[in-house]
Image (cartoon, rainbow, N blue to C red):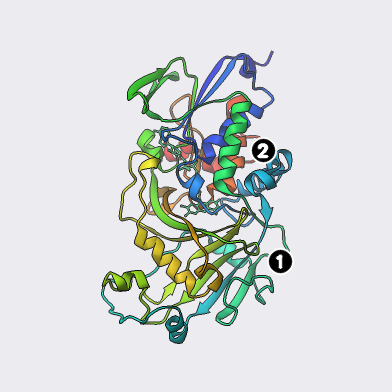
Amino acid sequence: MDKTTDKERNIVIVGGGIIGCTTAYYLTRHPSFNPAVHTITLLEAAPSIAPGASGKAGGLLALWAYPDCLVPLSYRLHAELAAEHDGAQKWGYRKLGCGSFDAIVSRQKIQTLQQKAKAEGEGEKTWEKLPKQNGAAKDLLEAGNLPQDLDWVDRAIVDNWSEMGSPGSTETAQVHPFHFTTTIAKLAQEGGAKIRTNAKVTGINSSKTGVESVEYLDREDDETKTIEAVTDVIVAAGPWTSRILPRAKIEGLRAHSVVYEAEVSPYAVFTDIQLPSDFIPEHRAAMGQKRRHKGRVDPEIYARPFGEVYACGEPDTLIPLPETADQVEHDEAQCDDLISYISTFSPVLASAPIKAKQACYLPRHMRFGQEAGPLLGKTTVPGVWAAAGHTCWGIQNGPGTGKLMAEFIFDGAAKSANVDKLDPRKFKV
Ligand SMILES: Cc1cc2nc3c(=O)[nH]c(=O)nc-3n(C[C@H](O)[C@H](O)[C@H](O)COP(=O)(O)OP(=O)(O)OC[C@H]3O[C@@H](n4cnc5c(N)ncnc54)[C@H](O)[C@@H]3O)c2cc1C
């Protein structure tokens, strides 16, 4: 009899974002999983699943994402999951066009859109980009004509259009992240995983030989509880990971987004918008404020299934990561900035109702001031595993991470991809 599969395992997953949920799912789908001897418990600190970035991200999937050791596996698994569980209906899985354009918004254009207000230069800052398109991704951009069916931007002011990959390519897809994560959590539960919400992990007790127990605060009862005889803990706490594993050096970076109610053609667009020098968003002018950005802004906009369009703005460091995901606050004015910039080049979105204004924290694994890719695998503490720090591509890389974590646990090693370079022990985690 195989020793690893026959041994009792009491596995605890910390975090009910996409990484924790896909890990629970693939553990229950692993051929060695035996509910008679294996227990899987997912603990989520917030009152519901996907309360953070996994419920508030854009949902873009791309073969040109990073890191390249994880992307192809995860992109393929997204397609397989969608085929197996009717992902098109349940979480809006579909292929979509993707590209980038520049636009120059003229002063006259703004005058027709908004009341003109006098600009003053103080307090301006340069727009900061989310790190989604790295150098390799930008190399894939092919100059071309704005697609005819991309009719929700003002064609008259779009300066150029570059498609990501070849026209009609199958290199970009999308899911609705909240629906994906919550459905995968449900499937994991049906497969035998237990899910506890309002359960904030406060400590992992371990000895030199392994993990002993996991303590958590039951936020409903306001009581500390302990899960005894734990054999494995997988920390998938996104930007909160370093609060449990301080050596992980994962930081949270807040980013705002808005969701429109609009049915538009399926494109994800990266933009580079040159605003007139005297442009002040109306809401800031009304508050007697000055403009916030120098000339250029780069919002990203994704048409989404289920009659939605998602747009995200720049990250900020104004508010540190709160204790739990349900305490994350958004800054109304930053969401309104985004809406106002987008209205300069999309009349369709300018008149669409706003469904949500929100913020969440990007989990970034930082070393020497730079992003160092996700941590995936064994840590230096026997029985403690890390699966965190997926920065801008955690939705794309969720299934691959979950699959590999299940292999680590039941097979003793990652089999479906070589992720040695993401080994947490390399970073002394
Ligand atoms: C604006 C924006 C747009 C994005 N767009 C995309 C995109 O288009 N495509 C893409 O691939 N990625 C995108 N991302 C990135 C993606 O959202 C993240 O990489 C991914 O959601 C991270 O998942 P996670 O499970 O690691 O973290 P999270 O979703 O943050 O989940 C971590 C969970 O752990 C829980 N937790 C924390 N501490 C504890 C504790 N002590 N005990 C119990 N539970 C705990 C939290 O409550 C949370 O639910 C985007 C991110 C942002 C911010």
3 relative to 59, above or below: above
Quadrant position of residue 86: top right
Percent of width and height locating residue 233: 48, 26
Q: Residue at x 64, y 22 (%)?
A: 33
The residue that mark 1 highlights is 166
Question: Mark 1 is on which residue type?
Answer: Ser
Q: Residue at x 43, y 27 (%)?
A: 381
Report the side of 209 relative to 165 (left or right). left
Report the side of 104 relative to 162 (left or right). left
Q: What element does badge 2 sit on?
A: loop
Taking the view exactly as shown, the residue that stands out farthest to the bottom is 108
Report the side of 425 relative to 8 (left or right). left
- First reached walking from the N terminus: tag 1 or tag 2: 1
Quadrant position of residue 158: bottom right
Q: Residue at x 33, y 55 (%)?
A: 317
Tell me how far mark 1 sits from mark 2, CA to CA. 28 Å
Label 1 Cα neighbours within 10 Å, binned few <14 / some 14-19 / many ≥20: few
Location of the C terminus by quadrant is: top left
Q: Residue at x 73, y 64 (%)?
A: 168
Which of discs 1 and 2 lies nearer the camera? The answer is 1
In terms of depth relative to the viewer, which is nearer, 131 or 257? 257
Percent of width and height locating residue 427: 43, 40
The residue that mark 2 highlights is 416
Q: Is residue 82 visible?
A: yes
Report the side of 94 relative to 388 (left or right). right
